[in-house]
Image: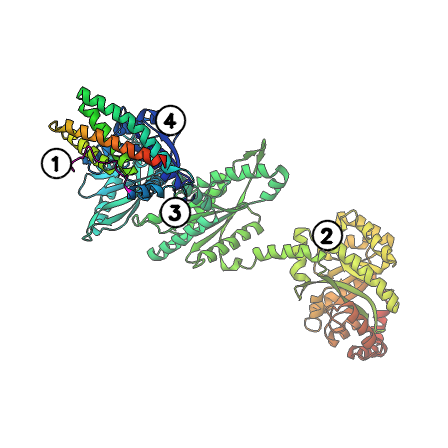
Amino acid sequence: MNAPTPHPAAAPQQLDAQALAKLHELDPDGRHGVVRRVLQTFETTLVRYVADLAEARDRGDMAVMGRIAHTIKPSSAAVGALALSVLCADVERQVRNGETAGLLPRVENLLSEAERALVAVRAMLRT
Amino acid sequence: MTPPLSFTDAGLPEQPDVLLVDDDEVNLLMTAFALRDRGFRITEAASGERAVDLLADWTPDIIVLDALMPGLDGFATCRAIRAMTGFENVPVLMLTGLDDDASITRAYQAGATDFFVKATQWSLLAGRLHYLLRASRTRIELERSKAKLARAQDLARMGSFDWRRSEGGLAMSPEGLRVFGHSLNDHASLRVLLRMVPRDDRRALLRLLHDVLRHASVLATDVPITLYDGRQRIIHVEAEPEFNEHGHSAGYTGIVQDVTDRRIAEDKIRHLANFDALTGLPNRRQLIWRAERALEQARRMQHQFALLLIDLDRFKIINDTLGHSAGDDLLMEVARRLRGCVRHSDQVMEGALEAAGARSHRTLEAVGRLGGDEFVALLPEVGEDRDAERVAQRILEVMREPIFVSGQECFVTASVGIAIFPRDGGSVADLMRNSDVAMYSVKNQGRNASAIYSPMLAGVGREKLELETALHKAIERNELVLHYQPKIDVRSASMVGVEALMRWNRGGRLVPPGEFIPLAEETGLIVPLSEWALREAARQAKIWQTNFGFSDSIAVNLPSHQFLRSDLIEHIHECVTTVGVPHRALMLEITEDSLMKDLQDVIPALHRLNEIGVEISIDDFGTGYSSLAYLTTLPISELKIDRTFVRDLGVTPQSVAVVTAIIALARSLSLRVIAEGVETLRQMEVLHRLGCGVMQGFLFSRPIPPDDLERWREQTVLPRKAPWIGQATELEFGSDAARAAGGRLKLK
């Protein structure tokens, strides 16, 4: 697999500016607070997904792992957490293809990348 | 927010209702927001189960489903929705991953209308939704239009079909199957349908089909069929060829329609147009059509044909006394009897006569009703006159039996006029006219008989009828006038009275009495005519009395039966008193013939007239057979020597003898004598010599209008300026014999 090598100890990452700009287009003058609502929803749901994913990993439930990766994939891309989205796509594909080998380390990566994304989103929400 | 202009479609909802189903809240939130921004009304559902619940009592315009969801995923949800009543055709858009080919296939299998790759390309998503909505709308309209068409076809008992040379032959629409009485499940092959056509028609139809196919031409024909329940129907089939890309005929597409009712209606219309509603016999139009065909055939095949015009005698009396409905009953019975007299054919015929052999014209034979009480029998071929006369005889015979109408026995007779082609006319119009002439000659000779036309009969008949009608109106239209001819006493060269003669000013032409008085007498019109003449004469007497002291009498001609009328005296009395002249201002002339015919009955009237001062003159004396015995007792005042004797005076010695005798008779009975028709001085001279001094004739004046008579009196009589005046004076004073004879006459 050619997925980029994750950096577990990397500094708090920035959300992708382009993705955020696209998000802004939904509500150009910010009247509806769309960006904020999306980020908040992303934060709340991601916390839940991370917990669910960790549980599935502990049970060894590949199907649930794949489905959660599928769900996180587009929303993480939408808020600009591109690294997370890419990891989701990897996991999803690997589950769909039934490749158990190397799946668990990838899920671990995904979980830590999700934590980083949460940090970035929370940072954004604080501003 | 308004949707982009390019998406506004007529008939589409302004704000389409979208059910958006996605388990991911972030995606749901963003998609909902993006679509709301683009004019959609969004209802969100976070799971398939929730979506199905919402649809229980609500129908969105379109449903957007995320393919992968926990629980009921997109595919299962889509299947569930499709299974719900009313959601068979609601557009469903499935959102799938970019690299998820399997989902795309599964989406279609689950019944999704289309798929879309999950992305943040909101405008593309909105565009896809609009596209799906429009397609859905088009589909709904198509469905509706198809349903309408099916219903219209059902109402019109119509259906459509396709026929392909290669694939399976005939494909008939459900409506088309119904036309043939088949159900949807029946397999209606061309062979099965053809078997419903009666054998003979089937053979003709197959020939036609082969022909149409060979030429790839348009098919349009009516086919009789027998339904499985035995009913007969007529199916109209119309089809056009369809060509493939190589220009070869690939098959046919067309319609079938049950036109039985239309056919029945058409037949009925045709029947109404050609047959008399009352009697059911061919009407004038149909008769004339048949007669034209018979004439063509007779001309081509060199034979004769006969046209019999049958007119009921005195039908009007029956109609007037028993009423029209009884008259109708009678006509129906007469029609029934007349039919039996010929080989009547009821076939409706229009267009060309089918060439069914040399005797085909026989089917033209019929009795028809021209209208009123006039019927026609058409005999398309007769060998000789006797054939037609035999049919006429049969007609007269069948009428002999009494006809019961309104509980009464009626006896009806008919007058039949016969015209035979080619002798009696070369066209139907001529034959009709001449049979009419023949029929009228029968009427004139007492009715209840038949006659074959002959040129000698022409001229009587219709013209007479027209004359009668016109004469009826002559009085009210003031077309009648009296002209006056003076009676002259040649010895004093003075006017001693006038005779009134009726003229009819008919459209600018003066009709002489000889042309209408006989008809007036025949029809009874003479009564009002005579009454008018008396009134008019009295009126004129008054005018002349005022203008020049006229104190003589105006003689009015009356037929004898007028003297039988009880109101004659009263009428004369009224005429003279109304205008204020004495009774003797009117004198009545009655011809010798007419007087003698009704002598016994007329005598009392003559006496009464005499009593009131109205004098009686016997006209045309010498031509009839007077009973001299009666003559002596009749209260008459004057004898008029008939013009025929006057005309022959000086020509035949016999006429001198007759005139001499009349004068002698008059003298012995103390009656005045007057000669009429005096045209020459010679006649005047002889008459005078024989002892008749009062005369009337062209020598003195023809009958002229009253004003002319006044002028004539002023310009001729008073200045004594006419040739006969000198002569008369000479006679008066130059002949003792004449004086002797004239002196014995009672002159006014």
Q: Is B232 drawn above or below residue B488 in the view shown?
A: above
Q: Which chain carries label 1?
A: A
Secondary element under disc 2, as helix, strand or loop, is helix
| Callouts 4 and 1 on one subunit | no
Secondary element under disc 1, as helix, strand or loop, is loop
Q: Residues within 10 Å of mark 4 (few under 14, many from 20)?
A: some
Q: Is residue A15 or residue B685 the one in the foreground?
A: A15
Mark 4 near mark 1, Cβ–Cβ under 8 Å?
A: no
Is residue B337 in the magenta section? no
| Callouts 1 and 3 on one subunit | no
Q: Mark 4 lies on which chain?
A: B
Residue B4 is tagged as: 3
Question: Which residue is denoted by mark 1 in the rendering?
Answer: A1
Question: Which residue is denoted by mark 2 in the rendering?
Answer: B527
Please provide the residue range marked out in magenta. Answer: A1-16
Residue B707, position in %: x, y?
Answer: 79, 69
Q: What residue type is labelled 2?
A: Val
Q: Is residue B583 or residue B30 the one in the foreground?
A: B30
For the question of whether residue A81 can be seen, the reply is: yes
Residue B54 is tagged as: 4
Q: Residue placed at 19% from the left, 36% from the top?
A: B101
Judged from this view, the residue extending furthest toward the top is A59
Query: Which label's residue is closer to the chain start, 4 or 2?
Result: 4
Q: What residue type is labelled 1?
A: Met
